[in-house]
Image (cartoon, rainbow, N blue to C red):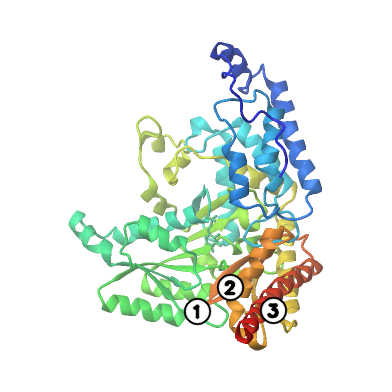
């Protein structure tokens, strides 16, 4: 732990407020402060660049108990007065112990290294600070977002009536998709009584490997506690279409209304892709809304070799994409796309002060008419600059690289007798566990949990954990093209060492007990 170089405790009174107005105005961005703006931002960029250049592990393994006192000690009512000092302080409370996704041994969650053109976009969009709700707060930003929505919808193949909107993330995209699906299911309800009767009977079918935001959305949407039906998956962890068909029939017989089927193009744990074309056929036949959650798998939209894995996605009614997962964009950058733009009307409210209905007749493009948010970041600019500098093929090639690397990693784990590995992912996850042999066999769950924690505490690598069929597994999620097979091999050795030592110590302790 470093010794703070800034004043942390003092009895001196806070600076006199009288000095404030002029100095405070100089901290606002305007024509008189551009030099300050340049210097301050450059100092921040420099600070991050130095950290990025020198970190030798993805984290430091610091605990909340160790870090919290440093953060708590900062007196928010006593400003440092200068960005350099604030950056020094930030070094201690954040940058020094941050988790770095660009490090090749960060293998845990769906976090990607970020494209530099996107960081340029981030710097521009926050400085200009456009808000994407109305034209009079954004102008060109609105048109750029619309172009990117059209571009994405075209890549998916949603047809001429498609539309959509940027969101804060896949969870929000899924929530909005299910809101639209719920409202479409309710359009036939003639009045409040009929609607009240229908709501508790609505059901959403997804797979056991679907994302938990579907459950959370159902709760937010006022559906019944058992509204989400998670059907079983096949050996590849894909939804079983026959189970979906059966479930739709069963619901109908029971007087229930299936308002949506949620297929997943890239499950978070297994990177499995549901059979989208079959789901589309079932949904079309049954007249059920098909939502495809491609938060993870959307990177295939720009792959030059694997786009076919998404075949059928073009028949969805709505699609979630997370550019901040597989398009190498910084958080947050996501979108919801819909096949029929009219569905977005369910998110439209007109406020006299902001977007009165007459603006629709005047053809003034207000994105707030399509969004769950009001004031909204111009996140689209990051993707715009990324595409303008790098282009889609380059992004697709990066994603293809991590998918290839995950296949190599799977081979490596499957050939290693110390580990058990689950099915090969279509994308870039590897789910596996250390398997103790002999008397320590029953310690498998505890040993894998221990290995993950020990690894995180060392900071040398970060891996994820999950439960599969009641057993504890470890998970690699590869999203960094800089990760090599050697990195994966090295992390496997660390895991085997931690888990092996744990099992050894426990079984040795047991033996001592028995002898004693
Ligand atoms: C990550 C993920 C989400 C949630 O997206 P956020 O951007 O984290 O809100 C939804 N669905 C799937 C399949 C995901 O992997």
**Residue 121 seen in render:** no
Left or right? Give the position of 228 relative to 34: left
* Distance of label 3 from label 1 (alpha carbons): 36 Å
Tag in front: 3 or 1: 3
Mark 2: secondary structure: loop
Residue situated in front as seen by the camera: 327 or 310: 327
Q: Quadrant of the C terminus?
A: bottom right
Label 1: how many Cα within 10 Å (few below 14, some 14–19, many 20+): some
Q: Earlier in the sequence, mark 3 or mark 2?
A: 2
Say few, some or many: other residues with alpha carbon within 10 Å of mark 3 (under 14 / 14 to 19 / 20 or more): some
Residue 272: mark: 2
Nearer to us of marks 3 and 2 is: 3
Judging by the rendered image, the residue that carries numbered circle 1 is 233
Quick one: SS at disc 1?
loop
Q: Earlier in the sequence, mark 3 or mark 1?
A: 1
| Residue for point 54% across, 33% down | 138
| Mark 3–mark 1 CB contact (< 8 Å) | no
Circle 3 is placed at which residue position?
Answer: 504
Q: Are marks 2 and 1 in contact (CB under 8 Å)?
A: yes
Q: Residue furthest left?
A: 193
Question: Who is closer to the viewer here, 506 or 226?
Answer: 506
């Amino acid at each position: 732990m470093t010794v703070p170089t800034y004043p942390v405790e003092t009895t001196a009174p806070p600076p006199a407020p009288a000095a404030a107005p002029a100095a405070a105005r100089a901290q606002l961005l305007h024509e008189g402060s551009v030099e300050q703006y340049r210097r301050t931002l450059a100092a921040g960029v420099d600070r991050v660049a130095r950290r990025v250049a020198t970190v030798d592990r993805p984290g430091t393994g610091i605990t909340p108990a160790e870090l919290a006192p440093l953060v708590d000690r900062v007196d928010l009512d006593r400003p440092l007065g200068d960005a350099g000092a604030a950056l020094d302080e930030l070094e201690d409370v954040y940058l020094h112990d941050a988790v770095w996704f660009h490090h090749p041994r960060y293998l845990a969650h769906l976090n990607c290294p970020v494209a530099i053109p996107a960081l340029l976009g981030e710097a521009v969009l926050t400085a200009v600070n456009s808000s994407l709700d109305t034209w009079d707060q954004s102008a060109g930003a609105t048109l750029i977002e619309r172009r990117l929505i059209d571009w994405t919808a075209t890549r998916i193949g949603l047809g001429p009536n498609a539309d959509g909107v940027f969101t804060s993330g896949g969870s929000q995209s899924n929530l909005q998709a299910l809101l639209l699906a719920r409202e479409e299911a309710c359009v036939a309800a003639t009045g409040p009584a009929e609607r009240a009767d229908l709501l508790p009977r609505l059901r959403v079918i997804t797979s056991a490997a679907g994302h938990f935001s579907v459950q959370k959305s159902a709760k937010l949407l006022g559906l019944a506690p058992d509204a989400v039906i998670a059907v079983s998956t096949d050996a590849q962890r894909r939804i079983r279409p026959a189970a979906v068909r059966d479930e739709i029939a069963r619901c109908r017989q029971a007087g229930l209304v299936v308002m949506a089927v949620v297929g997943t193009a890239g499950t978070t744990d297994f990177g499995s892709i549901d059979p989208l074309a079959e789901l589309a056929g079932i949904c079309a036949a049954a007249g059920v809304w098909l939502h495809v959650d491609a938060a993870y798998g959307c990177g295939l939209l720009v792959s030059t070799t694997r786009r076919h894995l998404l075949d059928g996605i073009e028949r969805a009614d709505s699609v979630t994409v997370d550019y901040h997962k597989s398009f190498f964009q910084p958080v947050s950058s996501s979108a919801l796309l819909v096949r029929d733009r009219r569905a977005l009307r369910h998110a439209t409210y007109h406020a006299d002060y902001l977007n009165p209905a007459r603006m629709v007749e005047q053809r003034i493009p207000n994105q707030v008419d399509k969004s769950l948010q009001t004031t909204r970041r111009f996140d689209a600019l990051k993707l715009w600059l990324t595409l303008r500098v790098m282009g889609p093929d380059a992004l697709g090639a990066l994603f293809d690289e991590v998918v290839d690397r995950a296949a190599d990693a799977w081979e490596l784990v499957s050939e290693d007798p110390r580990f058990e590995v689950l099915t090969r992912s279509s994308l870039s996850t590897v789910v596996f566990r250390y398997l103790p042999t002999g008397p320590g066999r029953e310690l498998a769950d505890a040993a894998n949990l221990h290995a993950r924690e020990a690894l995180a505490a060392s900071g040398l690598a970060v891996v994820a954990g999950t439960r599969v069929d009641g057993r504890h597994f470890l998970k690699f999620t590869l999203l960094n093209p800089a990760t090599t097979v050697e990195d994966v091999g090295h992390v496997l050795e660390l895991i085997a060492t931690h888990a092996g030592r744990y099992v050894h110590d426990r079984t040795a302790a047991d033996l001592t007990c028995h002898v004693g």
